[in-house]
Amino acid sequence: MAPPVRFTDLDECVEATLKRVGNRIVLGLPVAIGKPNELVNVFVRRALADPRIQLTIVTALSLRAPRWRSDLERRFVEPLAHRIFGDYTELEYVRLIEEKRCRRTSKCSSSTWSRARGSMTSTSSSNT
């Protein structure tokens, strides 16, 4: 068995992953905090740039810093968000979901990007 390979460059890690497993990538991510956000974002950007890559992200909960719509909301939320999220790296797939560049169903927990279709499909778990 080959020894593990360590990467300090995220793009090199994604490239090595694609070379090893091919263009169909399934990323299983931990629930809520603990995701390697920077690495996930590189996978997302790469999948959006290359229509041959099919990226599926399986996770149960993805956090983002809260947003505000008014000055009153900003004055309340901004200090709280700064204390809780600090320099938290936003997940690009969450932004894509918010921009409605995906479709939602209620069958399983995953998000799939396809540049060829020009969209991302996001599905979430249902307890029914």
Image: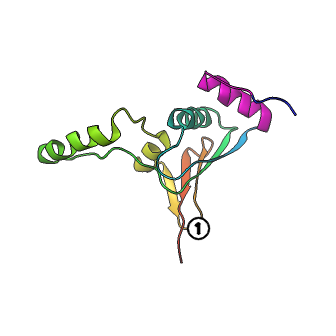
Q: Is residue 17 left or right of residue 65?
A: right
Q: Is residue 70 visible?
A: no
Give the vertical position of 17 relative to 123 (above or below).
Answer: above
Give the vertical position of 79 relative to 100 (above or below).
Answer: above
Whether residue 17 is in magenta: the answer is yes
Q: Whole-percent x and y of residue 34?
A: 51, 43
Q: Badge 1 is on which residue?
A: 107
Q: Amino acid at mark 1?
A: Lys
Within the image, what quadrant is residue 25 found in? top right
Within the image, what quadrant is residue 118 found in? top right
Q: Is residue 73 visible?
A: yes
Whether residue 9 is in magenta: the answer is yes
Q: Residue at x 34, y 40 (%)?
A: 85
**SS for tag 1?**
loop
Quadrant showing the C terminus: bottom right
Within the image, what quadrant is residue 19 found in? top right
- Residue stretch rendered in magenta on the structure: 5-21
Q: Whole-percent x and y of residue 120?
A: 55, 48
Hey, which residue is sitting farthest left in the picture? 72
Magenta segment's dominant SS is helix
Q: Which residue occupies the foreground of this view, 104 or 19?
A: 19
Q: Which residue occupies the foreground of this view, 48 or 25?
A: 25
Q: Is residue 100 left or right of residue 122?
A: left
Q: Residue at x 88, y 34 (%)?
A: 1
Q: Whole-percent x and y of residue 30?
A: 56, 49
Q: Which residue occupies the foreground of this view, 115 or 23?
A: 23
Q: Whole-percent x and y of residue 47?
A: 61, 37
Q: Is residue 50 left or right of residue 104?
A: right
Q: Callout 1 environment at 10 Å: few (<14), some (14 to 19), or many (20+)? A: few
